[in-house]
Amino acid sequence: MRALENIRRERLGLLLIAAALGVICTIAGLLLHAERTDRQVRARAQGVALARLLSKLPYERLVQSDGGRGVLHVLHEGQGNEDFAYAAVAGLDGGRLVEVAADGLIVPTAEIPAAPAAWLGERLIEMPSGPGIREFYAPVLDGSDRVAQLRVGFYEPGYALLAGRASFLATLALPIFLMAPLAYFLLRRQIETILEATHRLRELGGGAETAVPALPVTGELADFVQAFQRFVSLQEERLRSLQSEQSDLLVSSRVLSWQKTRLETILESLPFATLVLDEAGAVTFANTKVEALLGPSAKEIEGRRPDEWLEDAAAVAFLTRYYGQTPLRARRGGSIELPIGSKCEQILSIIAQPLHSEDEDTPLLGTLVLFRDVTPEALGRKAQGEFVTHVAHELKTPLNVFSMYSEALLGEDGASESFRIEAGNALRDEVERLSNLVNTLLGIARIEMGVVALKRQRVRLPDFLKDALENVSRVRADDLRVQLDVPAQMPAIHVDKDLLRVAINNLLTNAIKYNRQGGSVTLSVEDGPQEVSIAVVDTGIGIDEADLERLFEKFFRSESEGVQARPGHGLGLSITREIVDLHGGQIRVRSTPGQGSEFSIVFKKTPALMGEADV
Amino acid sequence: MASILVVDDEPHTRRILVLQLERAGHGVETATNGAEGLEKFRSGAFDVVVTDFSMPVLDGRGLCEQVRAESGPERPLLFLMSSQPLRDSASWAEAVPNLEVLEKPLSVRRLIGRIAERLGAVEAHA
């Protein structure tokens, strides 16, 4: 790099010398040109003047008849023009009558113009060697006749440098030439500084972090260099600072990116449809469960406020209630349950938590919103509430009968024998009813608490099912037919007799309760090679397809008119399934609304069921 | 004496109410659920309706609201037998004029007394 700079520096010196020589040459050229032009002008003026002057002299004065020296000789000796070539008087035939010429010059022959209009003029005569001659000619008249032709010639001036001009030129060229090294010296001092600064800058650019040392300069450039050095130092410091900040930012960016990914993963894995709203209430994050629960995808709602994509006005009002509030009030989170859907068939739980720092004055940063479908829980709560109401009703109705009959017995009616018998029967019925209800509730409680243990006993299904059918037949309508269809011979099975009775009783009770007038109930057994299936088939109101999924849920009762018209707690099928599950069996249901239903309890012929294992 | 409609799906309750109310000198008709009770109400002229709350087809609330909507605010007097404690009576019951909620188990003697008392008050007011 240094060698290259030296070459550049020396080249500058050479350029300066060349420029000085160029200036000198230009001046010399201009001087020569001016000299030549001046000589041309003087020769023309003198030539024209001589030609005119001499042509007016009488022929005899020009040409001495005795051959003596005439006017031309006087002229030749008296003129001082160094360019004078010759003067001659030529006859009309071209022959020279008299002539004078510069030393060594032979007067060239030339045509004598014939036409009078061309008698007077000038022309350039090329010489075989040396410069050409500009000739001025005029007629020598005798009266009006031309008797001879006067010719005066001058050398065409060249670019010859005259001795007098050479000293002038040398005087002019010397200072010019001397200025070149002076300028070179001065420029070189400045260039050295600039080159040094450039070198330092290059070093900085290449990563050198050393401070820029002071440079040996003076004058205005020194100020510039000092200012530039300060600027460079500042930039260097700033660069280091920026590099440090950039490094910190890079680390922070990576940490933030990782934290963002982690946070989004957490939000994504939450068992809720999760939204994060920004400080303006627009969605900044939505996990995939939002689309499954609410419909629009995360991309569709990103950057949009809830009122732009959520139809439910109450939900929108709940989600936007934090915006525009004071920070203290906005600090409190909240939850709400809303029915949504065209028929309010879905219950949505919305939990909103405003996001803010601990500082009360900090404005709201956004809102974390969790959505969850709580329809099953809501229906469960509703069913439980209804169940409690039913239980209260079922418990208090016998008490009511007790109360009213006992009051009557204590009064005048107590004296009547027939009333006492009636009251006794009524009270016994209500006691039995109350007892059954309490047993049912206890059974539910025991099964739910998981304290029910199977007590398998050997059971002959034909006899067992016959008894079960007879028990429930007492409460059937007179026109309802009941049938038992069991094989005459089949092996006994081992089940918990009391529990299975409850299960079969529930199915039969339902088959009777939900039957139609004049319908039938069939209890049958199919003894297959792998399974034993007990089926209860009715000709009742059937079950809506939409209800089949929830049929065995606790407290579930269909909203259909046919079910609502009949009393019940929604517990029978739930208990039945629990009992079948305890036996390792399955309960299956097929139903056609308006035509009837078939419930089947299916037991696989396991060693436990067939009594072939120690149980 | 008053003309009374007793609506309850529980036969023993209906039976003892009929016996005691008739013994008190009232004319009594019965229905086994709210819908049947509404039909009976529309086809007759009753001073008092005594109804259970929990019944199939149409419950006691539906019956009371419908009866009150189809009649004036004073007649018939409505008595609703509820399994819920009185303090838990729903606000809907308070919005139905001349509806008295009785908590089970109830005393028929007391019911007869309330009927006489309320009917007397209404007649005095008239």
Image (cartoon, coloured by chain):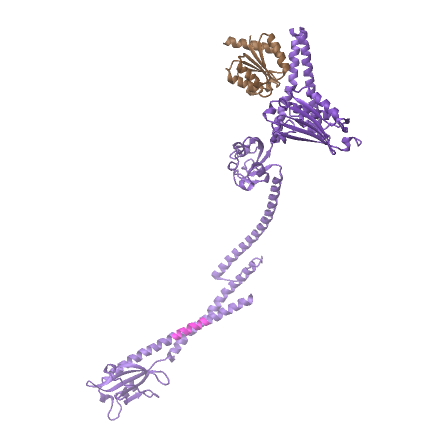
Chain colours: A purple, B brown
The picture places residue A465, in percent across and down from the top left corner, at: 72, 24
> Does residue A149 appear to the left or right of A507 in the view shown?
left
Depicted A4 relative to depicted A408: above or below? below
The residues colored magenta run A18-29
Residue furthest right as drawn: A614
Residue at x 51%, y 17% (from the top left corner): B70
Residue at x 53%, y 56% (from the top left corner): A232
| In magenta segment, residue A235 | no
The picture places residue A457, in percent across and down from the top left corner, at: 77, 27
- Front position in the image: A98 or A321: A321
Residue furthest bottom as drawn: A66
- Front position in the image: A205 or A188: A205
Depicted B53 relative to depicted A173: above or below? above
Query: Which of the 4 image quadrants contains residue A284?
Result: top right
| In magenta segment, residue A27 | yes
Q: Is residue A4 visible?
A: yes
Q: Quadrant of the C terminus of chain A?
A: top right
Q: Quadrant of the N terminus of chain A?
A: bottom right
Query: Which of the 4 image quadrants contains residue A495?
Result: top right
Depicted A319 relative to depicted B19: above or below? below
> Does residue A307 appear to the left or right of A477 in the view shown?
left
Depicted A296 relative to depicted B3: above or below? below
Residue furthest left as drawn: A143
Q: Is residue B107 visible?
A: no
Q: How many marks?
A: 0
Q: Give the main secondary structure of the magenta stretch.
A: helix
The picture places residue A320, in percent across and down from the top left corner, at: 53, 34
The picture places residue A153, in percent across and down from the top left corner, at: 30, 84
Query: Which of the 4 image quadrants contains residue A499?
Result: top right
